[in-house]
Image (tube, rainbow, N blue to C red):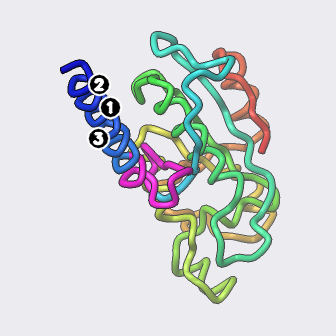
Amino acid sequence: MKILKGFAAATLVGAMAMSAATLAQEKAPDGYWLTPTIANYGRVHLLPDAAFMPQPDRTYKIVFSLTQAAKTPDVVDPGLDRVARTVNLYVAAGVPLSRLNFVAVASGPATALVLDDEHYRAAYGVANPNLPLIAALKKAGVTVAVCGQAVAERHFDFAWVAPDVILALSALTTVTTLETQGYVLMPL
């Protein structure tokens, strides 16, 4: 009888482990990386016992300064993808989206990532790969803005800025204004 109980317990544990493995594979086809909130962007690896975990009962205010362009115009801007990663990390750690106050402001070489598809295609010959991510970020409550001074410096028309993006006076004033409101600067 004891052997039978031990066998049943081992079988149950094995079945539970298989279910967990199957669940992990469903969440992450490659078994390692997940995109729990911003689907297909900002891949994260869950580490539930890691140090410096975000606290679910706290509010986080971050302004991301996006200043680098992607290496080629047909790929998502890496800074914008890191904003998605940050959202995914906080949510995976148990912080509700309602406690994330995130603003991403593009300037300098990153300015073009906010162009509407028509004008991005005209400039680079490909569809703007950043627009689906900008829409997903907006849906998650992230504000994506662009420096109005950078738009002018690059000779883009203000009307060419995608509808999901806010036209700011400048990145300089956006960052400093938000910092005085308690936001932490994360340069990307």
For badge 3, the amino acid type reads Ala
The residue under the point 54% across, 25% down is: 48
Whole-angstrom CA distance, mark 1 to mark 3, is 9 Å
Residue type (three-letter) at the residue carrying disc 1: Ala
Q: Earlier in the sequence, mark 1 or mark 3?
A: 1
Percent position of residue 172, x then y? 79, 37
Q: Which residues are magenta?
A: 24-39
For badge 2, the amino acid type reads Gly
Q: Read off the residue under disc 3.
A: 15
The quadrant in which the N terminus is found is top left
Image quarter for residue 20?
top left
Side of 108 relative to 96 (left or right): right
Q: Residue at left 59%, top 31%?
A: 47
Q: Secondary structure at mark 3?
A: helix
Q: Earlier in the sequence, mark 2 or mark 3?
A: 2
In the rendered image, which residue does mark 1 sit on?
10
What x and y, as percent, mark residue 147? 70, 49
Which SS does the magenta portion mostly show?
Answer: loop
Which of 179 and 53 lies nearest the eye of the viewer?
53
**29 is within the stretch colored magenta:** yes
Front disc: 1 or 3: 1
Residue 13's x, y, as percent?
33, 32
Q: Which residue is mark 2?
A: 6
Quadrant the C terminus occupies: top right
